[in-house]
């Protein structure tokens, strides 16, 4: 019954009469349609459409919203929120003493929230508080994320260097393309509707234990991406799908530090690497 405290995560409670309106006009996810009982991927973007902060958002039982974020980013994140606050009736409270727990393959504890980044069949949940049977470790959590293609900043990509499409936020409800304007919306919407996304998260399977995070993945002498989170012979990577498709069409072997690898897009995305179109196409 695996569960663990994610010691690198913390939550920011956003509350106030205008909290929903404030977030709706700022972040990628649709806050107005956010259901209780789940956590959903979201991001605050640069004006150029790249991810400045990635986090999970949920409705807080006491009212307002919980934003679940890498603890090292919290100070900068709250400063950025304050910058956009102006005169809005909204408050930000860092909840440093509330543990963030992730679990799976067991019944959800009371107050636990479904993690919508994973398919429902994975049974992954999030809990802010206690009352969970622990027993998993960070390696177990990394393996789970790799298996389902769930990337996180720091481990898998650098902030201000990736678009939401790169980490599949267009497929896991992390971006809403109908709700209207938010920071960076014009670039992300144009990328979506023109089908110009060329980088995607893939699961890497190696013929031997894979080298460390940051190692280049090569198609012959041409780099197509680099390893992110690594667990044994499996890893996550963000790669140029068009270059991978070219390599597949030419029957070139993909390697990481000389180790032969295969790349697959997560099943739940409905995408496939298509050598004919040189992109990630809907299956």
Image (spheres, helix red, strand yellow):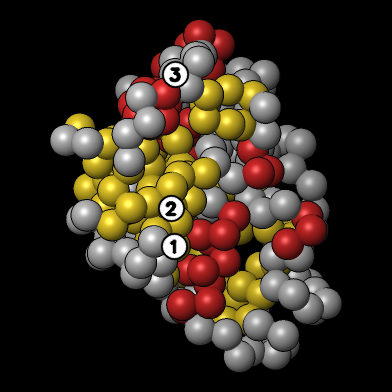
From where the camera sits, is residue 27 visible?
no
In the rendering, at what x and y percent does residue 122 appear? 73, 62
Return the residue at label 2. Answer: 204
Q: Pointer 2 and pointer 1: residues touching (CB < 8 Å)?
A: yes
Tag 3 residue: 278
Residue 196: x %, y % from top left: 44, 15
Secondary structure of the residue carrying numbered label 2: strand
Query: Is there any visible trace of residue 164 in the rendered image?
Result: yes
Query: In front here: 125 or 2?
Result: 2
Tell me the SS state at disc 3: loop
Q: Residue furthest front?
A: 251
Circle 3 Cα neighbour tier, 10 Å, few/some/many (<14 / 14–19 / ≥20)? some
Viewport quadrant of the C terminus: top right
In the rendered image of this protein, does residue 222 appear above or below residue 203?
Answer: above
Q: CA distance from mark 2 to mark 1?
A: 5 Å
Q: Answer few, some or many: residues within 10 Å of disc 2's Cα (few below 14, many 20 plus, some between 14 and 19).
A: many
- Which corner quadrant holds the N terminus? bottom right
Quadrant of the rendered image containing residue 58:
bottom right
- Residue with the mark numbered 1: 234
Which residue is located at x 45 percent, y 45 percent?
263
Q: At x 33% / y 48%, what residue is drawn? A: 157
Report if the CB atoms under discs 1 and 3 are less than 8 Å apart.
no
Is residue 215 or residue 111 the one in the foreground? 215
């Amino acid at each position: 019954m695996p569960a663990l405290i994610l010691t690198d995560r913390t939550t920011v409670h956003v509350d106030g009469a205008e909290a929903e309106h404030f977030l709706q006009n700022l972040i990628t996810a649709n806050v107005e349609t956010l259901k209780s009982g789940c956590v959903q991927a979201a991001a605050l973007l640069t004006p150029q459409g790249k991810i400045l902060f990635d986090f999970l958002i949920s409705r807080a039982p006491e009212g307002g919203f919980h934003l679940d974020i890498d603890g090292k980013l919290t100070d900068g994140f709250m400063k950025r929120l304050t910058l956009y606050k102006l005169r809005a009736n909204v408050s930000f409270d860092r909840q440093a003493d509330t543990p963030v727990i992730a679990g799976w393959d067991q019944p959800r504890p009371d107050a636990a929230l479904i993690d919508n980044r994973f398919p429902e069949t994975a049974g992954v949940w999030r809990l802010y508080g206690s009352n969970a049977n622990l027993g998993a470790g960070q390696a177990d959590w990394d393996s789970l994320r790799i298996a389902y293609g769930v990337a996180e900043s720091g481990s898998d990509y650098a902030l201000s260097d990736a678009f939401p499409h790169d980490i599949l936020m267009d497929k896991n409800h992390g971006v809403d393309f109908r709700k209207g304007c938010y920071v960076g919306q014009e670039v992300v919407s144009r990328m979506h509707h023109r089908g110009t996304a060329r980088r995607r998260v893939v699961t890497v399977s190696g013929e031997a234990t894979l080298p460390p995070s940051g190692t280049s993945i090569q198609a012959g002498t041409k780099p197509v991406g680099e390893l992110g989170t690594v667990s044994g012979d499996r890893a996550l990577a963000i790669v140029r799908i068009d270059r991978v498709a070219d390599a597949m069409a030419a029957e070139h072997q993909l390697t990481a530090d000389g180790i032969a690898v295969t790349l697959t897009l997560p099943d739940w995305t409905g995408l496939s690497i298509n050598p004919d179109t040189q992109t990630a196409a809907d299956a």
